[in-house]
Structure formats: C-alpha cells, structure tokens
C-alpha cells in the first residue's frame, strides 16, 4: 500500500532529488559509519577524519583511507545504485546528492552526483593545491605525494571542514525547488547534509525516506519505506 503511494508520488513528480548516505552502499558490502558494524564503532573519527589527525599522523590516516579504497574497489554497485541511475534517465529533472565518497553512484551510471563529502578517489596536494584522480589500490607508497613533492591528502571532507561551496549551493537549490525528495540510507545526523531534509519539507517537497530503521528524517517524511534500499528502490521504480 505505502509502496503504491510512493509510486504515485514518483509518477507525478517533475523535479526530483535523491539524497543518499552510507546505507545505500551497505548491500555492496561497504560498512556504514553508525549502527552495528559501523566504522565509528571500531575507529575514532577524531583520529582519522579530521585535519588535526592528518597533521599529526598523515601515514596513519592514509593507511585507513587506503584500506577503505581497497574495500570499495572490490565492491560493486547494487540494485539501489542502479535504480537511481535509471531514475535519472527518465525523470524530467533529477539531482543526486550523496554523502558517500565511494564512487559507486558513478560506477552505476549516475551522471553528475553532487558529492557533499568529496571523493575517496580524488587526491589533493597540501602544497600547490593541485587535485587529481588516482584509482590505484593499494596506493604504491604512503603517504602519497604530488608531482611538486607536496604531501597529498584524500579529497574528502573531514569533520570540522566546510563542504565544497558550489556543491552545497547546488544541493540547496535542488531541494528548494524539488517536488519529491528521496532520502536513502542516511542516519540524517551529520550536518549540514541533514539540513537538506527539513529544507526540502519546508519548501513544500514530498519526502520519502528509505531506510532499514527510523531516523531524525523520518518525522519530515510523508512516507517511510522500511527495508534495504537495494530491494525497495527497484520496487518503487518498477511501476513508475
Ligand atoms: P551512517 O552510517 O550514519 O548511516 C547509515 C544509515 O543507513 C543508517 O540510518 C542505517 O539505518 C541505514 N542503512 C543501513 N543499511 C541499509 C540498507 N541496506 N538500506 C537502507 N538503509 C540502510 O551514514 P551516513 O548517514 O551516510 O561523513 O553518514 C553521514 C556521514 O557521517 C558520512 O558521510 C561520513 C560519516 O561520518 C564524513 O566522513 C564527513
């Protein structure tokens, strides 16, 4: 019944946004951050995902990112990623906003995901600020260096850092004019990304949450579909 409601909303939507989090990649075998088996249960974010941690011990931080890159390289996009790529093909206007750095949306065929937290495959020089993609796993030497000799850092957003400005602005614009927002596999507790959900609701968008459990975004959602996104998303789209 509620899936049917979701299909109707999807069918009538003209401007769509999907906001995704680590949960959409869980069925690809990539650990989420929070909850059972989450990365932040075994590691401290402040030791690994802050500018201070990197300044203190770049090798330790890089070892963790290199391990995650290897994990991601072995994984494949799942039906949830593919469903969103397919939706992009047929929606009039579709914006994918992701908190994920794993690149699985790109590999599933999504054209230009707005990556709020950057990209684990991108490296940035701390000295000359050059940025480049590097898909090698494992990286040949840690910590990696720029051709200028400077220390490279992962091209991701760490705690305490601002989001890439153009990307954030584009995400705010997209949810402000959206008539339907799908909130998929995010705990909706990390700001400012989580702010996009109330922003969308206040601007009048319908919100559908797809998650295995309740989150702070649930109260803003007109429809909550409980279950794995790799099953629900293809189902939701099957009749739209
Ligand atoms: P979290 O790990 O906080 O939350 C993952 C969410 O996915 C939870 O709400 C789970 O219930 C849900 N989930 C798990 N498996 C699922 C499945 N198969 N289908 C649907 N939902 C599922 O991940 P994020 O919300 O993405 O930031 O976390 C936000 C940010 O916090 C990340 O981008 C990262 C992290 O610290 C930075 O590194 C800056």
Image: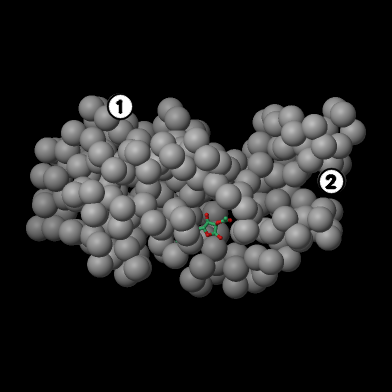
Say which label, 1 or 2, has the lower sequence index.
1
Q: CA distance from mark 1 to mark 2?
A: 39 Å
Left or right of 179 in this view: 148 = right
Q: Which picture quadrant has residue 133?
A: top right
- Dot 1 lies on which element? helix
Name the foreground residue: 60 vs 69. Answer: 60
Left or right of 130 in this view: 89 = left
Task: Give the crowd class for mark 1: few <14, some 14-19, many >=20 residues within 10 Å.
Answer: some
Q: Which picture quadrant has residue 79?
A: top left
Name the foreground residue: 89 vs 146. Answer: 146
User: Which residue is located at x 23 percent, y 35 percent?
Assistant: 15
Position of the N terminus, as image quadrant, is bottom left
Q: Residue furthest right?
A: 149
Q: Which mark is residue 210?
A: none
Do the CB atoms of the residues marked 1 and 2 lie less than 8 Å apart? no
Question: Mark 2 highlights which residue?
Answer: 143
Name the foreground residue: 101 vs 173. Answer: 173
User: Which residue is located at x 52 percent, y 40 percent?
Assistant: 165
- Dot 2 lies on which element? loop
| Residue 162 visible from this viewpoint | yes
* Total numbered badges shown on the rendered structure: 2
| Residue 227 visible from this viewpoint | no
Above or below, 110 against 155 in this view is above
Q: Position of residue 155 (x, y in %)?
A: 66, 42
Question: Mark 1 highlights which residue?
Answer: 89
Q: Is mark 2 within 8 Å of ligand 1?
A: no
User: Which residue is located at x 74 percent, y 30 percent?
Assistant: 130
Left or right of 177 in this view: 57 = right
Name the foreground residue: 93 vs 229. Answer: 93
Q: Position of residue 159 (x, y in %)?
A: 62, 59
User: Which residue is located at x 51 percent, y 68 percent?
Assistant: 34
């Amino acid at each position: 019944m509620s899936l049917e409601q979701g299909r109707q909303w999807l069918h009538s939507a003209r401007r769509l946004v999907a906001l995704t989090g680590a949960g959409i990649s869980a069925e690809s075998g990539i650990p989420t951050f929070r909850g059972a088996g989450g990365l932040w249960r075994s590691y401290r974010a402040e030791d690994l995902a802050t500018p201070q941690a990197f300044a203190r011990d770049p090798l330790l931080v890089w070892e963790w990112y290199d391990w995650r890159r290897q994990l991601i390289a072995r994984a494949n996009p799942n039906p949830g990623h593919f469903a969103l790529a397919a939706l992009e093909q047929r929606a009039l206007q579709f914006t994918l906003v992701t908190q994920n750095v794993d690149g699985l949306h790109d590999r599933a065929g999504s054209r230009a995901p707005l990556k709020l937290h950057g990209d684990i495959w991108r490296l940035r020089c701390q000295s000359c600020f050059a940025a480049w993609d590097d898909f090698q796993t494992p990286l040949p030497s840690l910590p990696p260096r720029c051709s200028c000799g400077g220390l490279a850092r992962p091209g991701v957003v760490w705690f305490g850092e601002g989001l890439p400005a153009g990307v954030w602005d584009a995400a705010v614009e997209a949810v402000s004019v959206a008539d339907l927002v799908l909130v998929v596999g995010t705990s909706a507790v990390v700001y400012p990304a989580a702010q996009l959900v109330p922003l969308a609701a206040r601007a009048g968008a319908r919100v559908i949450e797809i998650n295995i459990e309740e989150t702070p975004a649930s109260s803003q959602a007109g429809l909550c579909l409980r279950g794995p996104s790799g099953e629900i998303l293809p189902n939701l789209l099957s009749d739209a």
